[in-house]
Image (spheres, helix red, strand yellow):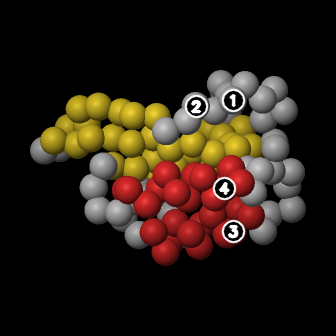
Amino acid sequence: MGDKKVTFQVVIEDCQKDIELLQKTLDSFKSCDYPKDKFALVLSAKKESEWNKIPKIIDKLKQSRYIATAIFSIVKGDKITKHFVFLLTSKRIFIAKFLAG
């Protein structure tokens, strides 16, 4: 997704914990008066609890013309062992991290 218009990415961490809270956070971004082609949403989740609902959320965001991706982490014990990227966004320097809610 090498869109050169994107100026920053927003990372929402631990989205798998509470899907309703994640949806509330996404609704807040959707209501912002900012062009949706100027930022990318990155949903970061551990492969636990409700992580399997996130690809459908990414698909809905993309259908609404948002630039979105997900990064899944497999955790064993207290260590992250692997990462999987659902879809890659453009490479940008500016990243803002948010917890859902």
Q: State the image coordinates of residue 96 (x, y, percent, origin top left).
A: 61, 45
Q: Amino acid at mark 3?
A: Ser
Up-down relation of residue 82 to residue 9 (above or below): above
Cα separation between marks 4 and 2: 14 Å
Label located before the other in sequence (1 or 2): 1
Up-down relation of residue 95 to residue 58 (above or below): above
Cα separation between marks 3 and 2: 23 Å
Decide if residue 16 is in sight here: yes
Up-down relation of residue 1 to residue 24 (above or below): above
Q: State the image coordinates of residue 13 (x, y, percent, origin top left).
A: 46, 52
Label 4: state its secondary structure: helix
Label located before the other in sequence (4 or 1): 1
Quick check: marks 4 and 3 in contact, CB under 8 Å? no
Cα separation between marks 4 and 3: 13 Å
Q: Which residue is mark 1?
A: 1
Q: State the image coordinates of residue 94 (x, y, percent, origin top left).
A: 67, 34
Label located before the other in sequence (3 or 2): 3
Cα separation between marks 1 and 2: 6 Å
Q: Amino acid at mark 1?
A: Met
Q: Going 74% across and 64% down the picture, which residue do you hit?
A: 30
Quick check: marks 1 and 3 in contact, CB under 8 Å? no
Label located before the other in sequence (4 or 3): 3
Name the front one of labels 1 and 3: 1
Q: Which residue is mark 4?
A: 61
Quick check: marks 1 and 2 in contact, CB under 8 Å? yes
Q: Which residue is mark 2?
A: 88
Cα separation between marks 1 and 3: 24 Å
